[in-house]
Image (cartoon, grey):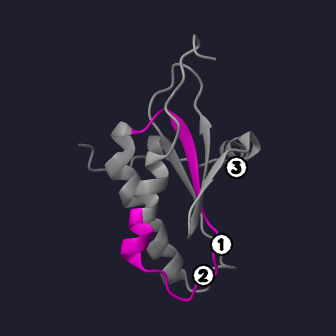
Amino acid sequence: MDKTFARCHRLTRTDEFSSVFGFRRAIRGKFLAVHYRPRPDGENGARLGLVIAKKFLRRAVDRNQVKRIVREQFRCLRGGLPAVDVVARLTVKSARIDRKLLADEVVALLERLPPRQSKAEE
């Protein structure tokens, strides 16, 4: 299993985030919304982007903790995910988010991503 979260597994540019949000597909949970967009044919693997707004978590330490939890769950599940670009976005204002509940929600949301469709199915 890949122990790293390499740059090639991340969304880094604004246009990459915009294309995911522009695709307008999302799966919502209690704490997060997972926006996704299938990657073009020939590109394998899932990539992750994070949007954790200061509006929802004021303290940087709390925002960073949420990012670490989401990244770690994504890293562990990445091999079994379809070829999609994913943006995880915090959707609730909370003073305290339970780490275990957040980790469980991330796993549940990522497992609900639709499998890759072949051209014959479309």
State the mark number for residue 16.
Answer: none
Under circle 1, the secondary element is loop
User: In front here: 24 or 5?
Assistant: 24
Residue lying furthest top in this view?
120
User: Where does residue 78 sit, x and y in percent of width and height?
Assistant: 38, 43
Under circle 2, the secondary element is loop
Residue lying furthest bottom in this view?
95
Q: Amino acid at mark 2?
A: Leu
Q: Is residue 37 magenta?
A: no
Identify whether 4 is placed above or below 31. Answer: above
State the mark number for residue 53.
Answer: 1
Residue lying furthest left in this view?
1
Under circle 3, the secondary element is helix
Q: Quadrant of residue 81?
A: top left
Q: Amino acid at mark 3?
A: Thr
Image marks 3 and 2: residues in contact by CB distance under 8 Å: no
Label 3 belongs to which residue? Answer: 14
Q: Residue at x 64, y 50 (%)?
A: 26
In the rendered structure, the answer to whether residue 102 lies left or right of residue 34 reads left
Image marks 2 and 1: residues in contact by CB distance under 8 Å: yes
User: Where does residue 1 sit, x and y in percent of width and height?
Assistant: 23, 43
User: In front here: 6 or 90?
Assistant: 90
State the mark number for residue 57.
Answer: 2
Which segment is the magenta one?
81-104
User: Where does residue 41 sit, x and y in percent of width and height?
Assistant: 56, 20
Q: Quadrant of residue 73?
A: bottom left
Q: Amino acid at mark 1?
A: Ala
User: Where does residue 110 sit, x and y in percent of width and height?
Assistant: 46, 49
Q: Residue at x 72, y 40 (%)?
A: 23
**Circle 3 Cα neighbour tier, 10 Å, few/some/many (<14 / 14–19 / ≥20):** few
**How far is disc 2 from disc 1 in space, using C-alphas?**
7 Å
